Amino acid sequence: MKKVLIKTYRYALLVATLAVFLFSCANPVTNNSFTASASSKALVAPTEVDFNSTQVLDMKNTAGTVDSLKIETTPVLGQKYGPVTITKLWYQTDGAALAETGTTVVGFDFKSDTPVLAVFVKGSNGGNIYDYGSAGVLLDTELHTIVNASGKYAGFSHADFAWIVDTTTTTVPTTTSTTVPANPTLYSISGFVFHDLNNNGVKDSGETGIADVALSLGNDVKATSDSSGAYTFANLVAGSYTVTSAGKSNFWPTPYDAPVTAKTVTLPESATGVNFGLSYESISGFAFKDTNADGTMNNGDAGIEGVALTLGGAASASATSGSNGSYLFDYLKGGSALYSVSAANIDGEFHTPYLSPVTSWSGTASASGVNFGYSHEKVAGVVFYDANRNDIYDSGEPLLSGFTVRLSDGKVASSVDGAYAFDNLKGATTYTVSADDRAGFVHSVAASRTVTPANSVPAEANFGFAVDYSWIVGKTANGFTIGYWKTNLDKAIAGKTAGTQVSKANLLAYVGQLSSFALAPLNVSSMQEASNYLSATGSAPTLLLSKQLMGSEFNYASGAYIGNNALATQFFLYDGEYMLVNSGSFSSAQLLAQKDKYDAYNNSHGGAVLF
């Protein structure tokens, strides 16, 4: 009996196959109004119709060898309709192209348990018919609606399927489903991609969404977060899904030390709040002029531009401080990741504090105020003629150029208009500053000073000099007496040339020099004024000093320098003028003693100056 039944079923299968063949010949899925679609990756080119065709549904026969159904709603990914399963959805774009993500479904891929003979995909006023012939197919891709007048795929309306009924089982099917319910149970998964400011993995109040982050399900369904960070996977059947976030450039998934990039969701209940946190940290600070060298950026400390900084540890980068001294290393992973920042040296500057300089920092990200201080100190002063020998630079005392000053670290400076400076020195350091000896001069008190510059205020070290009278004694000079100069001046005034030793032109030149020489007392403006000083009578110490000093100044103007030392000779004469200006500070004996020194100079006549 069993063998007879099997033979009967085999005979029925043969009959069914023959019937399909005859049906296909009698009812081909073609129509003179059909035109070939210009775009398809399906196994067969679709035939386009401009009406709601029922030809695919009509392929169902009474013999039970061919069945059909109509999907009346947008197909659902993973849903099975009869023997057909939807394996992928295609979405509308701005043109005649298909997209894997979107909001308007226009096509699908499918697979089937039994051969599919034909499919009709309806959209707008017409649709595409895919005819696979009598053998049918078990799967196909990119079946889609027609392209409408605007050049875009029409939105999905419904789809019809016809397939060969599987008759190889021992029991002939007694029922078939011809229409999928209009409202199948569908679910969704939704959530946000957000800026997780506190790195706790939870979307807290005030944390904003992040747009344009790609998300996917395990079955290749994709979505993209919108401007608010929101995303949704809709039209899902019951089952288990894994939502994966692709992240965003320069952001890190949170929590940093246990990052979440995927979440598994089990339907049947629509899932909301499937959120993904992203964030980043930064390290920032300033390179600054540390005025008081305490290592802290205080009010008034200015930034330093152009300092090179290097990031190391969990990431590598470099930066340069900006115009206000600031720098920033951004988009760093937070949590327990460790970083280091090192600041380069600057020529002429020192890292502060001086005794424990900070050149680098280490720690975790999300750190501000990682500052690096720089500073330097300065020693400066003047070299001056110490007219009153008090070792203090007083207003009006002459400044001396060309004197050599040395610093204990080996630096050497020469005074210019009396001033010198040693710059770019390390603070919290004691220096010895000394002035070299100079022929014809003595240090008024000390030849060296000890200073400790600090707080960006130059440490002052001034050096006073005075004429070395012991050096003058015995030095030669070609000085002439006051009578010599008076005679030549009077002849020049009278216009006489006979018996003169100095020309009128030279005398006028000397007067021109002496009109602004040293201090004011003997600043003569004419030969007659000079002659008057030289011919003055009386016994007052200041008068006697003035006469001899006037003669000495003419000797100096003529180039008769003591020991060929013009500077020492100049300040030898300066002392006399200083005494005349400040005569009340000197005794008559002191004034007369100074007069005698000029008398000795005036009587040197090429020999030694002796006093």
Image (tube, rainbow, N blue to C red):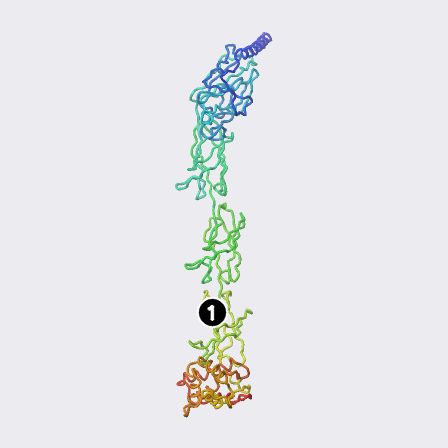
Among the 4 quarters of the image, the one containing residue 225: top left
The residue at 41%/59% (across/down) is 299
Where is residue 256? Give x, y as percent.
Answer: 49, 43
Give the percent coordinates (x, y) of residue 389: 46, 80
Residue beneath the point at 51% across and 27% down? 88
Residue nearer the viewer, 96 or 452: 96
The vertical placement of 106 against 608, above or below, is above
Q: Which residue is mark 1?
A: 459
Q: Is residue 594 visible?
A: no
| Residue 555 percent across, percent down from the top left | 50, 85
Tell me if mark 1 has few (under 14), some (14-19) or many (20+) residues whose alpha carbon lies within 10 angstroms of its own: many
How many numbered discs? 1
| Rendered view: 114 above or below 349 | above
Of residues 562 and 142, the one drawn nearer to the viewer in this rendering: 562
* Quadrant location, the N terminus: top right
Between 266 and 365, the one lying in front of the other is 365
Q: Amino acid at mark 1?
A: Ala
Q: State the SS at label 1.
A: strand
